[in-house]
Image: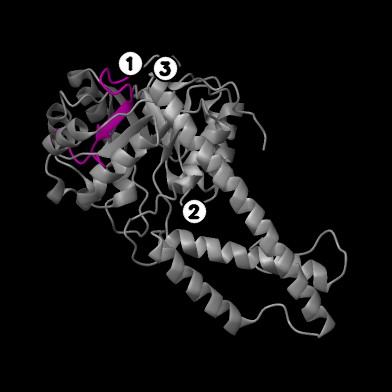
């Protein structure tokens, strides 16, 4: 993995004041700018909530034609007026160089790139080229599909164009069928992005993860507990009548309530006794992990013995009935021990994958490389 984002500016170097209580960057505003009155009323209603940036969708890429796709350029003066009236910075989503040009002409302070654009490297490169020499912060949402490299690639394109005030927004990933979330959070993906680029500001968009109001508080709090650098939330003066994404938007007063309930935790306690106790528990975890890995390695030794036995007797590697029995037993045992079904599913799938990998090597002789039969690559 390249480290082309190594010298990115951290959020506290952006020149934008953070929320004094939470030290987080908070973006709020309607999904879509529907009218000058709606946008101004929403902006005024958000006063006192602690947000620093007013958002509004101007051009709305929708899944299917016929849905409300935004009012377009005419809303840009509305956003500027609302920002000036409330003394807030403004941000809009842009999907092509013309959008970017119009946004900058009308004084938009921050640009964000949506998930449907991030997924297309050609579109991202066009935007990045148009940003060359322009000192405006850019926030990049994750692509609609769970692809970390595609997300990093989009960020790198802007970085290579000279953008240094650069950040990421986690809005979840599309899935097929009904799920608890509109877009699954897959928290491990943004956390891996943060691990690789610790100075890269990372915000959470609970509105698009949840798709409904009743789970916004939980997701917002979880992102804060995971030490995200801020939030982007959709708010509307009359959300039930919103022309887009009505179910996930909050009234300004409800947004204030959500912000008031957020618990912002610290990275460390500072008390030596607390740190020592925490370190002792972490040491126990380290020891358990080493033991677990040793047990897994021993398990694979037996797997290889089974593979050798199968090779000598011309028995196939994969035995569906046997694996089905093993999987059901491990899932049941794990759930009885308090482990989640989703974790156990991943555990069992990866145990099977690694077992097939070892037995494939045994069955086909001493080869160093082979195709993983379960890989999608």
Q: In the image, residue 328 lies at what x, y percent?
A: 48, 75
Mark 1 and mark 2 lie on one chain; the one further toward the N terminus is 1
Give the mark nearer the N terminus: 3 vs 2. 3
* Image height of 16 relative to 46, above or below: above
Residue visible at 59% across and 39% down? 153
Q: Which residues are magenta?
A: 18-37
The answer to whether residue 208 shows anywhere in this view is yes
**Relative to the observer, which residue lies in front, 130 or 178?**
178
The Cα atoms of the two marked residues, 3 and 2, are separated by 30 Å
- Residue that carries the numbered disc 1 in the rendered image: 17
- The residue that appears at 40% across and 65% down in the rendered structure is 335
Q: Quadrant of residue 52?
A: top left
Quarter of the image that includes the C terminus: bottom right
Quadrant in which residue 348 is drawn = bottom right
Q: CA distance from mark 1 to mark 2?
A: 33 Å
- Circles 3, 1 touching at the beta carbon (< 8 Å): no
Q: Locate residue 71 relative to residue 342 in the image: left or right.
A: left
Q: How many marks?
A: 3
* Secondary element at image label 1: loop
Q: Is residue 261 magenta?
A: no
Q: Which mark is residue 196?
A: none
Q: Is residue 57 above or below residue 101?
A: below
Which residue, given by chain and number where applicable, does mark 2 sit on?
A: 145
Counting from the top left corner in percent of width and height, residue 350 is at 59, 62
Which structural element holds mark 2? loop
Q: Residue furthest right?
A: 366
**Does 32 appear in magenta?**
yes
Image quarter of the N terminus: top right
Q: Which of disc 1 and disc 3 is earlier in sequence?
A: 3
Query: Looking at this view, is 38 or 112 the one in front?
Result: 112
Residue at which label 3 appears: 12
């Amino acid at each position: 993995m390249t480290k082309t984002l190594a010298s990115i500016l951290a959020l506290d170097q952006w020149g934008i004041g953070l929320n004094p209580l939470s030290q987080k960057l908070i973006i709020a505003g309607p999904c879509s700018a529907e009218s000058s009155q709606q946008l101004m009323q929403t902006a005024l209603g958000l006063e006192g909530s602690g947000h620093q940036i007013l958002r509004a969708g101007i051009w709305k890429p929708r899944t299917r034609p016929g849905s409300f796709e935004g009012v377009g350029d005419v809303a840009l003066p509305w956003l500027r007026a609302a920002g000036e009236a409330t003394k807030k910075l403004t941000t809009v989503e842009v999907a092509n160089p013309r959008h970017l040009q119009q946004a900058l002409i009308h004084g938009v302070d921050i640009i964000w790139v949506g998930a449907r654009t991030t997924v297309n490297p050609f579109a991202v490169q066009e935007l990045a080229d148009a940003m060359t020499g322009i000192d405006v912060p850019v926030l990049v949402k994750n692509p609609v599909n769970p692809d970390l490299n595609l997300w990093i690639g989009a960020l790198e394109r802007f970085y290579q164009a000279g953008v240094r005030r650069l950040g990421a927004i986690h809005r979840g990933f599309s899935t097929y069928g009904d799920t608890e979330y509109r877009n699954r959070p897959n928290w491990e993906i943004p956390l891996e992005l943060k691990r690789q680029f610790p100075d890269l500001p990372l915000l959470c968009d609970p509105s698009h993860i949840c798709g409904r109001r009743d789970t916004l508080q939980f997701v917002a709090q979880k992102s804060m507990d995971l030490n995200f650098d801020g939030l982007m939330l959709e708010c509307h003066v009359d959300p039930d009548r919103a022309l887009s994404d009505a179910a996930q938007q909050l009234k300004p007063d409800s947004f204030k309530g959500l912000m008031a309930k957020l618990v912002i935790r610290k990275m460390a306690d500072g008390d030596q006794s607390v740190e020592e106790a925490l370190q002792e528990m972490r040491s126990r975890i380290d020891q358990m992990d080493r033991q677990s890995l040793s047990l897994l390695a021993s398990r694979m030794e037996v797997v290889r013995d089974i593979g050798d036995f199968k090779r000598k007797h011309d028995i196939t590697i994969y035995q569906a009935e046997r694996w089905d029995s093993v999987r059901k037993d491990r899932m049941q045992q794990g759930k009885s021990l308090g482990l989640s079904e989703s974790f156990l599913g991943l555990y069992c799938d990866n145990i099977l994958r690694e077992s097939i990998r070892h037995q494939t090597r045994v069955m086909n002789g001493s080869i160093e490389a082979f195709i993983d039969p379960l890989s999608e690559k």
